[in-house]
Amino acid sequence: MQSKKIAIVILAAGVSSRMQKSKQLLPWNNTTMLEHAIKTAKASKANSIKVVLGANYQQIITEIENKQTEFLINKDWKQGIGKSIAFGIENIASDFGAAIIMLADQPLIDVLYLNKLIETFQNNNSKIIATKYKNRVGVPALFGSSYFTKLQMLNSDYGARQLLVEYEKDVLSVEAGSKTVDIDTEEDYKSVLKLNKKS
């Protein structure tokens, strides 16, 4: 079977209201959280990387060192993460056979894990490959093009979760352990920095 071209869509459009500063630009491993996510995605087996920005996008773009990055500016970012997913998928749908939805605020997600999602998908083409959490599945998640139309219809703050529930029988979950931790508050950030030093 011919392998499908895979894009990684990094979601980084939010205003970081609970952090009260752009968490995309928080320091991480001698760079920023967003730059780290971009470098991780680019080092994976994916064919292309797109970054969805919204709030503070002009400032964020000027501080990203990797100028070859393709940014997609979602003017409707206030409508929530679902709208950013829909916008990102709309921009890649015609050129790719699958997409990984990835968050900029999960800095422990690494290249090995992204490649594991890709390899699992390549062995199970009709399946959604999602990350296993304690009581649910979530992102990073890889969707084949047969789900793109549904993804483009998202417009809420629930992201891809409702699709993962709706198509539960099609989902294969992959264990990520502590890599799934995300950052919403200053306390989260300090906690994840400690985790990163231990790993």
Image (spheres, rainbow, N blue to C red):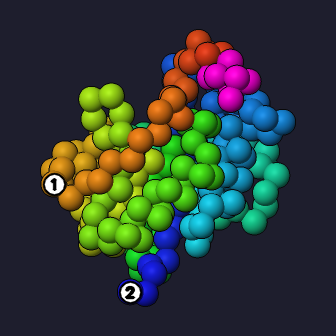
Q: Picture quarter containing residue 127?
A: bottom left
Viewer-closest of 96 and 90: 96
Query: Main structural element of the magenta stretch: helix, strand or loop?
Result: helix
Residue at left 36%, top 33%?
A: 133
Can residue 109 be seen in the rendering of this structure?
Answer: yes
Q: Which residue is mark 1?
A: 169
Q: Picture quarter containing residue 144?
A: bottom left
Residue 9: image tag = none
Label 1, residues with CA under 10 Å away: few <14, some 14-19, many ≥20: few
Residue at left 54%, top 54%?
A: 114
Residue 5, position as x, y percentages in the image = 49, 77
Q: Earlier in the sequence, mark 2 or mark 1?
A: 2
Using residue 169 as the reference point, say whether residue 87 is left or right of it. Answer: right
Residue 195, position as x, y percentages in the image = 64, 22
Tags 2 and 1 touching, CB below 8 Å: no
Can residue 79 be seen in the rendering of this structure?
Answer: no
Magenta stretch containing residue 196, yes or no?
Answer: yes
Q: Amino acid at mark 2?
A: Met
What secondary structure is marked by label 1? helix
Q: Amino acid at mark 1?
A: Lys
Residue 129, position as x, y percentages in the image = 35, 56
Using residue 187 as the reference point, say whether residue 67 is left or right of it. Answer: right
Residue 190, position as x, y percentages in the image = 66, 16
User: Which stretch appears magenta?
Assistant: 192-199
The correct choice, above or below, for 46 with respect to 39 in the image is below
- Measured in 3D between alpha carbons, the distance from the residue under mark 2 to the one under mark 1, in whole angstroms, is 23 Å
The correct choice, above or below, for 49 with respect to 168 in the image is below
Residue at left 39%, top 47%?
A: 174
